[in-house]
Image (tube, helix red, strand yellow):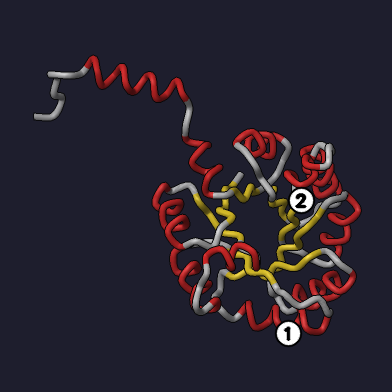
Amino acid sequence: MELYLDTAKIEEIEEGVELGIISGVTTNPSLLAKANPTAPIEHLKKICSIVNGPVSAEVVSTNYKDMVSEGLKISKISENIVVKIPITEDGLKATKVLSKENVPVNMTLIFSESQAILASLVGAAYISPFIGRLDDISYDGMKLVKSISEILKTTNSKSKIIAASVRHPLHVVEAAKLGAHIATVPFKTLKQLVKHPLTDIGLEKFLSDSRGISIVS
């Protein structure tokens, strides 16, 4: 499974890429607003120059024709741009058109198996189930990841699952077990994936025991 960063903050992306574990980035209008760029297009270009992989940028239009027009413009920002489109009737129509134009689409706000099936049928390159938001309403978001994974295998779909709305490291681990191709994580969760209290204790002991010892002179 690949890891993407769910952020639009340049400093977070640079640090994630430097760790050598980030294969892509997902953004949305809310994340871009938090990054507060003076020029959003230039900001996305900067992200694409840092990440050697897919970078999702979301349309803000809700009308089918406007989604297509905006999607085509967004796709020209960089070769690694993926157009992010919400699962609506207009979104499905727009995804079908963009897919035929060889524009990769990340179909977002997926909350059911039926929505995932429709996204796959219109050629979405990526399907993003929002597991954390499902957990928030007392539904096991991981059950949806498992179901979508089984459906895509059965139908030989080329769509990839991006486990989105990830809240903690366990979400990442479970998503990997259940067949998600990608998990997109906030920067905080990325940092949490590295940490373990026993690692810290072990390192502290090693350093304490090695005082006065030099392997490299």
Q: Which of these two is toward me, 164 or 160? A: 164
How far across and down, in percent of the image, does residue 12 sit? 46, 55
Would you name the residue on which mark 2 appears? 129
Q: Furthest residue to the left?
A: 217
**Image quadrant of residue 54?**
bottom right
C-alpha separation, residue under disc 1 versus residue under disc 2: 25 Å
Q: Mark 2: which amino acid? A: Pro
Q: Mark 1: which amino acid? A: Ser
Taking the spot 91% from the left edge, 53% from the top edge, the residue there is 114
Taking the spot 63% from the left edge, 69% from the top edge, the residue there is 57
**Image quadrant of residue 11?**
bottom left
Q: Furthest residue to the top?
A: 209
Q: Which of these two is toward me, 62 or 82? A: 62
How far across and down, in percent of the image, does residue 123 sit? 79, 66
Would you name the residue on which mark 1 appears? 69
Query: Residue 130, labelled with which disc?
Result: none
How far across and down, in percent of the image, does residue 105 sit? 71, 67
Under circle 1, the secondary element is helix
Instruction: Decide: few, some or many residues near mark 1? Use Cα within 10 Å; few <14, some 14-19, many ≥20.
Output: some
Taking the spot 64% from the left edge, 64% from the top edge, the residue there is 30
Q: Which of these two is toward me, 50 or 121? A: 50
> Is residue 129 shown above or below 39?
above
Point out the tag, 1 or 2, that comes first from the N-terminus.
1
> Is residue 172 shown above or below 70?
above
